[in-house]
Image (cartoon, rainbow, N blue to C red):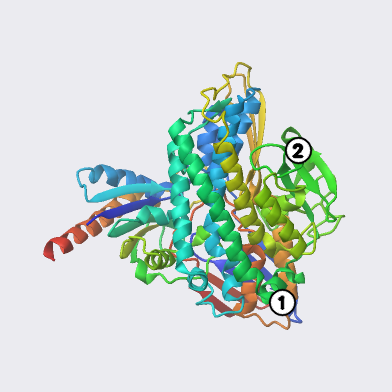
Amino acid sequence: MGTRVSIDPITRLEGHGKIDIFINDKGDVDRAYFQVPELRGFEQFAKGRPAEDMPQITSRICGVCPMAHHMASSKALDDLYKVQLPSTAKKIRELMYNVFFIEDHALHFFYLGGPDFIVGPKAPKAERNILGVLGKVGMEIGKEVIGMRRELRTLMNDICGKAIHPVFGLPGGVSKVITREEQQRLIEVSKHAVEFGKFCLKAFDDIVLKNPEYVKLITSGTYTHRTYYMGMVDADNRINFYDGDIRVVDPDGKERVKFAPRDYLQHIGEHVEQWSYVKFCFLKDVGWNGFKDGKESGVYAVAPIGRLNAAEGFPTPLAQQAADKYFSTLGGKPVHYTLATNWARLIELLYSAERMRELAADPEIDSSDVRAIPTEKPTEGIGIVEAPRGTLIHHYKTDDRGLITDANLIVATQGNLARIALSVDKAARGLIHAGRVDDGILNMVEMAFRAYDPCNGCATHSLPGQMPLVVSVYDSKHNLTQEIRRD
Amino acid sequence: MKTLVLGLGNELIADDGVAIRIARILSQHLKSRDDVDVLESSQHGLALIDLFSGYDKAIIVDAIKTGAHKPGSVVTMSSTELSAVEAPSPHFTGVPEMIRIAQDIGLPFPKSIQIVAIEVVDQSTVGGPMTLNVEKAIPDAVAAIDALIYTTTSEILAS
């Protein structure tokens, strides 16, 4: 082993995306590792606590997608207490979950295609940030995004108790009915959200798709992996974020398996590597065959590209139309290009807005029948939702009193981790030759994981100050030979 | 003139909750001040942008793990000392970028943001206890923030 290059954030963000690149004596990449931190002690912390506290506790684990944890946890409680939700309760949950999805996905507009895309992957680093993006797309768009988010957050606040840490999912239903007045507001905001979704896709079209360079980058081999894909689908195999079965398609787009949330352990395995604390998910049925793509490798992808590939389509017309264009532009289904994620995310945003509009107008939505009281003894419960970053699994076991004896979470990014490791390794091997490591190359290596928007700890938040990176190059005797700082 | 004190962190996770503890003490201290609001959040990055809107001045309290300071050190800095850098996602957007975005899109935003950061040790153990040096730093941090608020008030009275 020759030289070690590490891309290492030095603030509290340490571990949020640390890349170690080992360079051999010829100056080529021997192996690149993507390291992430692990949240420790969650199971211990959960043990002995009343199961009904879990939607509150788990939503506090994560500052990024608390609503996703709250929802997966509420669904695990439904299963734990073997209770069927009244139809209105289910619709309210799905409605508010889609409101959350629009809000979360909208934030990404600022990162439309990633700063790398908009400003150009090899642009000077000083311009390769969000300001460069806004400079190119126009500040009016920024205003629109902030305004849209504010409307959505106000709704979440009023209907879910809190926008950040919702207090509305209960075993068997929700804690609050939707009033006529709230329904009217939901309808109004949903109309705005649909327009917003269309507007985002139009901007993506103008800025990214009309530039052949960007399309070439999206489809370049460096960021392409032929893996399996996973996502939640409804009874007709169409995308649903809140409820359904989990469908997996193979690298040719054929269904490999479809399973009910209760059976997830039969299908999803967790692989352990010596160099990482985090477990890598894989398909048990295919098996773990290392960090490889192809049909023989159990590596799969979740989140927007995973979901679009795993489903047969969207149940709403505008999103379906946008998805048709996505697949035809990118050479058919499945799309194996990691960098297509941002496009897929905007199509999902439009779907969520359309689904919000449908559910907000549902005649049942203001019914007062929003809770079924559990009467069964709790034993074991599993709840799965699609979080913005992928399939999120909550699994609890309790004693007769409903106190947690065992808790297992598989967080969304874990589903993508093996593919992220694969991407980083492939990008490093493809881009670094003869020991030449500069800022532009490292940026392109980082792009391999940025598109996934990895969020691993489900634990830490960051000082919103800066994200400096230090790239250290060591020789085979571990002497520091080069340091590239980004701060 | 309105000042926001924003405590960031996760109270379930060992030292990560230090700023939340500080914010709760300050909200008691500053109860009678209607020109100061104390908020807490576990969110980060661009998601926080709305919280700042409408304030003239803001103080962010947060845990930081740099390894450059002794655990429990209280470090005060101004947002102007932070440079805008490339961030991988909206969740990592920095303060300077937030200020610039807010200015550019015409959002009423504090002109200056000060940051009071506490160097911590353990940010990854759920339900873990706060480490001793970090716990001991709480009164220092509270005093530092009180002083920043006092200075702000004095500046206004003097002007």
Q: Residue at x 73, y 41 (%)?
A: A233
Q: Nearer the viewer, residue A131 or A376?
A: A131
Q: Is residue A286 above or below residue A466?
A: above
Say which amino acid is labelled 2.
Answer: Leu
The residue most toward the left is B158
- The residue pinned by badge 1 equals A431
Q: Position of residue A141 (x, y in %)?
A: 49, 63
Q: Is residue B127 visible?
A: no
Q: In the image, what residue type sits under mark 1?
A: Leu
- Left or right, residue A234 beside residue B45: right
Q: Is residue A211 visible?
A: yes
Residue B5 in the image, given as x and y percentages of width and height = 31, 53
Q: Closest to the observer: B17 or A127? A: A127
Q: Dot 2: what SS?
A: helix
Q: Quadrant of the N terminus of chain A?
A: bottom right
Percent across and percent down for residue A131 are 47, 71
- SS for dot 1: helix
Marks 2 and 1, how far apart at CA: 38 Å
Q: Residue A259 bears which disc, if any?
A: none
How would you rate the neighbour count of disc 2 (Cα within 10 Å): few for under 14, some for 14-19, many for 20 or more? few
Task: Answer with left or right where residue A396 lies relative to residue A281.
Answer: left
Q: Report which residue position mark 2 lands on.
A: A265
Q: Quadrant of residue A82?
A: top right
Using the image, determine if residue A447 lies above or below residue A477: above
